[in-house]
């Protein structure tokens, strides 16, 4: 009988351990455990040298369960003392905890993304009704440096702008699950948290951006925009050979505070402007490549001429004179450039402009990127047909324009710009991005001749870019002073003043270009001498050069010289 | 003096009161033994199971503690990375430099350094151990980050 009884007990124990085990376990778990999703560690974004530009750090979210609080108002005051909540927040929390018992909610956020140490401190209080959950906080250790391209995430860590958005899937990873036991009263049993499904961390990005050059570009821009009271500005720095973007800086004056700040939006790729005379280098290079002109070709150039319905002019009055194409470029003659375009033919000219990347988005695929406005040749009407030769009657983003000029620096080969260099996998392996697309747009000879002419733009006493010159460094470039369309559809603001877009695009060393830079100032004051590309933008190119030389180790050849040679 | 004790003969009356007796067979003891053994075995087994489960729970607690420590160290690693990145950021360095009345350089010059002089200077700076040299001199933030990722790949 005893044996039978013991046997029965054994059988029951066996059943509890085997067939009935799962059901009891589940029932118990349902009663006393809670599962929460744990977000995967978001990937880090590095600059080209491995410096962190954006990364996630441990943080905590603090919430309360008003139904379980022993003393709601006291708890709110306690949390206020620890978290330094705003008055509005305290007021709203007090309203929640003072509701009649039947109307209270079971979950109310108090604060998100607080320091992890502070979260541990609050958790250590062991107060019923206060929940502390781990979460991550996205930070940019370099402050605002690079925020133009990095974009941002929302409070839940999801990318909503810039590269954070573009590469959100890659950076996010896959979430996991955390199970914890709940004691009577709703508190988490200390030490009961178990990761039942580990999260898979996101992958990391290594950008082409150089943090030091990015910072220097932003600082120089902010200083200049403040100095001359402009609206904003851009600087783009490309590695000539690879098209990798080493700096993508955008600053703008805030309409309300009047402060000049690094923008959160990447206007270098999302906004387009009439580039003005910088586009003349494309017309010249195209004509040289097509063989319709050479260095000795001259044109009779008046200071103004009627085209279709418009009387077009040069920037300054001059006698009708014979000009070589170099002189046309150096003195930035609009009429002279039109003559070159006419010699080339406007259809061929349009094709060359397209080959140089105008009118189409780059390979960057950046969120919100603009293709600019570059009409089909058949859609151009009136004087537009000729003004496109000097960058008016069309629009391009700063990135499109610097990539176009870079083709001249790169011996006539267009290379698509890029922002991401490689991806770091979960096991630390680096996967480089595929090489950028390249295509030849003009011959090497045409590019070299154009580059030498662009060096004259900087060095010639009549050149418009003399303020871009740097002692001992051969620099080639072109200025642009374009009219910018106003909101009213004209080129004049409400005061009757013109609105300008002043730019300079250049590269160095001329004989073996390493880096191509575009500097643009948006809406410099209309009545000041700082409204020109040569005065507003060219000096910033010169100011940035020491940083570029230092960071990139660009050492001019022994026989190289600047304008002084 | 000797006393003779005569053995009393059984009387017919006492014979008549003697109960009927028979030879009792010796009982088998092995079922009881087996039962006791089984009971002992069960008790030992249950005790063993209890001890085993206790050990299991203790080991699991230890594993949980270790996992929490690993997670805590990873979080600390990330915090230190962030702190290092802040210290090395151009913005902070620029601010500190300006506080020391330093100004941004406007020109750059390249100076040739004699290789021999450089070698002498390095030697004078002293020898560091391989690990320190690797960490300080040869590996950057990304390399160190990748090393940690490689070690912790696939682990919770």
Image (cartoon, rainbow, N blue to C red):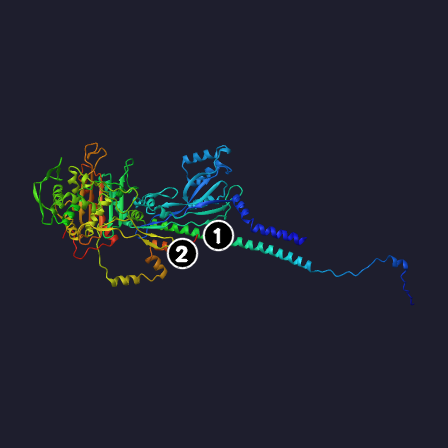
Name the side, left or right, on which A294 lies relative to A97. Answer: left
Label 2 sits on residue: B151
| Residue drawn at the location 22% of the way across and 35% of the way down | A486
Please report, as a chain letter, where disc 2 is located.
B
Label 2 and label 1: CA atoms lie apart by 19 Å
> Label 2: few (<14), some or many (≥20) within 10 Å?
few
Q: Position of residue A493 (x, y in %)?
A: 21, 33
Which of the pair A113/A336 is nearer the observer?
Answer: A336
N-term mark: 2 or 1: 1
Q: Nearer the viewer, mark 2 or mark 1?
A: 2
Label 1 sits on residue: B65
Please report, as a chain letter, where disc 1 is located.
B
Query: Where is residue B33, by image quadrant?
Result: bottom right
Q: Position of residue A255 (x, y in %)?
A: 28, 36
Name the side, left or right, on which B110 lies relative to A108. Answer: left
Name the side, left or right, on which B31 lies relative to A44. Answer: right
- Viewer can see residue B101: no
> Label 1: few (<14), some or many (≥20) within 10 Å?
few
- Viewer can see residue A6: yes
| Residue drawn at the location 37% of the way across and 43% of the way down | A158
Q: Position of residue A129 (x, y in %)?
A: 49, 40
Please tell me the numbered disc located at residue A368.
none
Query: Where is residue A462, by image quadrant?
Result: top left
């Amino acid at each position: 009988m005893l044996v039978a009884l013991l046997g029965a007990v054994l059988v029951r124990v066996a059943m509890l351990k085997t067939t009935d085990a799962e059901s009891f376990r589940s029932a118990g778990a349902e009663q006393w455990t809670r599962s929460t999703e744990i977000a995967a560690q978001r990937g880090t974004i590095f600059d080209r040298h491995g410096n962190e530009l954006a990364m996630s750090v441990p943080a905590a979210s603090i919430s309360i369960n008003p139904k379980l609080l022993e003393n709601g108002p006291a708890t709110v005051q306690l949390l206020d003392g620890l978290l330094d909540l705003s008055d509005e927040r305290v007021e709203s929390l007090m309203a929640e905890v003072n509701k009649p018992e039947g109307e209270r909610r079971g979950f109310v956020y108090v604060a998100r993304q607080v320091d992890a140490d502070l979260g541990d401190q609050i958790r250590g209080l062991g107060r019923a009704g206060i929940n502390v959950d781990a979460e991550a906080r996205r930070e940019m250790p370099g402050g605002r440096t690079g925020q133009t391209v990095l974009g941002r995430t929302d409070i839940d860590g999801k990318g909503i702008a810039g590269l954070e958005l573009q590469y959100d899937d890659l950076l996010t990873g896959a979430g996991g699950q955390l199970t914890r036991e709940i004691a009577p009263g709703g508190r988490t049993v200390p030490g009961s948290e178990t990761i039942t499904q580990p999260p898979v961390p996101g992958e990391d990005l290594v950008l082409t951006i150089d943090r030091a050059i990015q910072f220097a570009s932003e600082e120089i821009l902010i200083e200049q925009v403040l100095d001359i009271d402009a609206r904003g500005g851009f600087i783009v720095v490309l590695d000539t050979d690879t098209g990798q973007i080493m700096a993508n800086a955008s600053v703008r004056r805030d309409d309300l505070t009047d402060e000049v700040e690094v923008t959160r939006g990447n206007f270098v790729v999302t906004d387009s402007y009439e580039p003005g005379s910088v586009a003349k280098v494309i017309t010249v290079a195209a004509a040289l490549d097509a063989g319709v002109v050479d260095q000795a070709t001259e044109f009779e150039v008046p200071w103004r001429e009627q085209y279709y319905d418009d009387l077009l002019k040069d920037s300054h009055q001059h006698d009708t004179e014979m000009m070589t194409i170099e002189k046309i470029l150096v003195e930035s003659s609009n009429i002279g450039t039109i003559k070159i375009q006419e010699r080339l033919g406007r259809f061929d000219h349009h094709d060359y402009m397209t080959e140089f990347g105008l009118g189409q988005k780059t390979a960057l695929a950046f969120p919100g990127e603009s293709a600019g406005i570059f009409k089909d040749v058949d859609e151009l009407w009136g004087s537009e047909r000729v003004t496109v030769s000097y960058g008016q009657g069309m629009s391009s983003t700063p990135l499109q324009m610097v990539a176009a000029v870079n083709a001249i620096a790169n011996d006539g080969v267009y290379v698509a710009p890029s922002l991401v260099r490689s991806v770091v996998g979960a096991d630390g392996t680096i996967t480089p991005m595929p090489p950028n697309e390249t295509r030849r747009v003009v011959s090497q000879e045409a590019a070299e001749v154009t580059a030498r002419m662009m060096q004259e733009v900087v060095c010639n006493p009549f050149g418009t870019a003399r303020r871009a010159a740097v002692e001992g460094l051969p620099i080639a470039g072109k200025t642009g002073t374009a009219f910018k369309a106003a909101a009213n559809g004209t080129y004049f603001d409400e005061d009757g003043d013109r609105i300008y877009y002043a730019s300079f695009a250049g590269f160095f060393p001329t004989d073996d270009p390493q880096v191509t830079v575009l500097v643009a100032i948006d809406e410099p004051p209309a009545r000041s001498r700082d409204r020109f590309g040569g005065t507003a933008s060219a000096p910033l190119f010169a100011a940035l050069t020491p940083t570029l030389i230092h960071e990139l180790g660009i050492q001019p050849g022994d026989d190289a010289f600047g304008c002084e040679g | 003096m000797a006393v003779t004790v005569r053995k009393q003969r059984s009387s017919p009356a006492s014979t008549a009161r003697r109960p009927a007796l028979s030879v009792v067979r010796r009982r088998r003891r092995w079922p009881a033994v087996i039962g006791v053994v089984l009971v002992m075995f069960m008790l030992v087994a249950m005790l063993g199971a209890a001890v085993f489960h206790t050990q299991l729970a203790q080991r699991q607690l230890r594993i949980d503690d270790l996992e929490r420590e690993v997670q805590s160290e990873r979080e600390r690693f990330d915090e230190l990375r962030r702190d290092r990145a802040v210290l090395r950021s151009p913005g902070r360095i620029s601010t500190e430099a300006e506080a020391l009345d330093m100004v941004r350089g406007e020109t750059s010059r390249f100076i040739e350094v004699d290789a021999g002089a450089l070698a002498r200077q390095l030697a004078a700076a002293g020898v560091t151990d391989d690990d320190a040299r690797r960490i300080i001199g040869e590996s950057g933030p990304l390399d160190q980050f990748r090393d940690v990722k490689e070690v912790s790949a696939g682990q919770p």
